[in-house]
Amino acid sequence: MPSYDYASKHELKAAIHAAYLKLDAEYDGISDADRDARFPDVDRTPAEIWAYQLGWGDTPKMPAPGYKWNPSLVRSRGMVTSN
């Protein structure tokens, strides 16, 4: 997968929006009735492709189950304030 460097947040947002418009145009001809249909030589349904591209799926757990925060590191980085 290619990696890109963007000069600004605005440039990144513009690239994301352009990619969305391109993907949206590709699916204009697919009816709602066909959104879950499997097509030959395609490994995902149109709905699955959209979900993948938009990052939908399981909600991530933060921190990951079993992960232990290092409290002194968290405090030293200013991530929490003491009362």
Image (cartoon, rainbow, N blue to C red):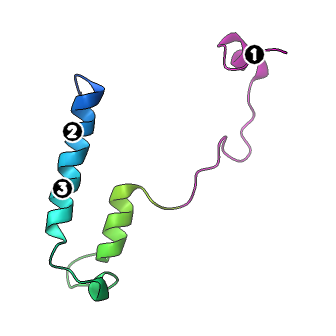
User: Which residue is at a point 71% across and 48% down the rendered structure image?
Assistant: 65
Label 3 environment density (alpha carbons within 10 Å; few <14, some 14–19, many ≥20): few
Where residue 40 appears, as percent x and y from the top left, is 20, 85
Q: Secondary structure at mark 1?
A: loop
Q: Splitting the image into 4 quarters, where does residue 82 fall? A: top right
Residue 9 in the image, given as x and y percentages of width and height? 30, 28
Q: How many marks?
A: 3
Disc 2 residue type (three-letter): Ala
Q: Magenta residues, as a range?
A: 58-83
User: Do residues under tags 1 and 2 come within 8 Å of each other at their CB atoms?
Assistant: no
For disc 2, the marked residue is: 14
The CA distance from mark 2 to mark 3 is 11 Å
> Counting other residues with Cα less than 10 Å from the Cα at mark 2, is it few (<14), some (14-19), or many (20 or more)?
few
Q: Which mark is residue 12?
A: none
According to the image, label 1 marks what residue? 81
Give the secondary structure at mark 2: helix
The answer to whether residue 2 shows anywhere in this view is: no
